Amino acid sequence: MAAATRLQSTDLAKVTIRAADGSWSLHWGEIWQHRELLYFLTWRDIKVRYKQTVLGVTWAILQPLAIALSLTAFLGRVVHMPSGELPYPVFAYMGMVLWQLFAQSLTDSSNSILTNERLISKTYFPRILVPVSAVLASLFDFAISLLVLVLFLICFRIAPAASAALLLVFVLPATFSALGAGLWLSALNVKYRDVRYTVNFLTQFWFLATPIAYPIGVVSERWRPLYELNPMVGAVEGFRWALRGHGAFPAKAVAFSTVTAAVLLLTGLYYFRRTEDTFADFI
């Protein structure tokens, strides 16, 4: 009997629970195992966003459209802000489509850990799925806004150039920038709750530092290299260039913005991985 007991005890599986190693590794195998959870988190975020709303997904159209029309009324008609060969309403709305994706992704991902505090404190899963799902949910609104952009082009009789096939390529810097900044802010938000109050201020300042309401040409050449470090500059300029296909490709702005977006994403991933094992303690 004693021998049988010893034999059974040696057959028991051993499970070792370790804290995050703080490395750059994201444990892709573990993330892949939880891919269904990522899907359900994303779909839940989409449904919750428009739950018990009268207009529903129409808000995804009204928000960027209202701001674009406001810019057209004050800057396009009153100030006569230059917009190149594009009509100012199209110029402003094209910028707002990409900006709305960035701003919404940044805001939702930065608050995602606190929003899901009950889930995080009760069970284990890769925490990075939470901010990633917030960004993926924002892509749903972006897709709807793109349909309205098509209507804009039809109304103003603008035929997309062949370069429009590259349109979605410039969505990547905007998405990666929002995710990188969201990883930083979501991790900091767990320990320092006043971080959430700075997100709106940061978003407003970022909007003014991005060529949404004005073309990049109005920025002085002296400040242009510093200005183009903003990852949204190259994303917005490249987005507009891809659609109209006129003028020189903004290679410098796109290169600067791509590098900045990559740095922001990598450092955000690193800091998130270094701190994610303490989320449940602070929440």
Image: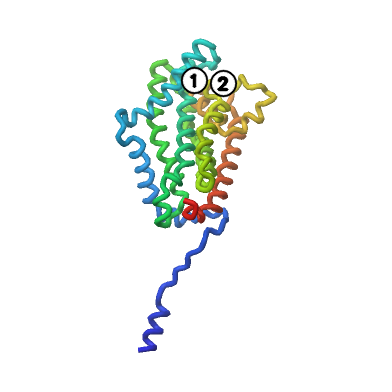
Tell me the element at label 1: helix
Q: Nearer the viewer, residue 4 or 83?
A: 4
Q: In which quarter of the image is residue 216?
A: top right
Measure how far apart labels 2 and 1 are at the Cα level: 9 Å
| Label drawn at residue 91 | 1
User: Number of labelled discs?
Assistant: 2
| Label drawn at residue 163 | none
Is 50 placed above or below 10 here? above
Disc 1 crowd, CA 10 A, few/some/many (<14, 14-19, 20+): many
Is 60 placed above or below 6 here? above
Q: Which of 53 and 157 is in front in this view?
A: 53
For disc 2, the marked residue is 215
Q: Which residue is drawn at 42% across and 36% down?
A: 139
- The three-letter code of the residue at mark 1 reads Phe
- The three-letter code of the residue at mark 2 reads Pro
Residue 164 in the image, given as x and y percentages of width and height: 47, 28
Disc 2 crowd, CA 10 A, few/some/many (<14, 14-19, 20+): some
Q: Is residue 147 found left or right of 211 in the rendered image?
A: left
Q: Residue furthest right?
A: 222
Q: Residue at x 52, y 16 (%)?
A: 85
Q: Residue at x 51, y 53 (%)?
A: 276
Tell me the element at label 2: loop
Quarter of the image containing the N terminus?
A: bottom left
Residue 29 in the image, given as x and y percentages of width and height: 46, 57
Q: In which quarter of the image is residue 141?
A: top left
Residue 125 in the image, given as x and y percentages of width and height: 43, 55
Check whether the beta carbons of the residues at disc 2 and disc 1 lie within 8 A of each other.
yes
Q: Which of marks 2 and 1 is nearer the N terminus?
A: 1
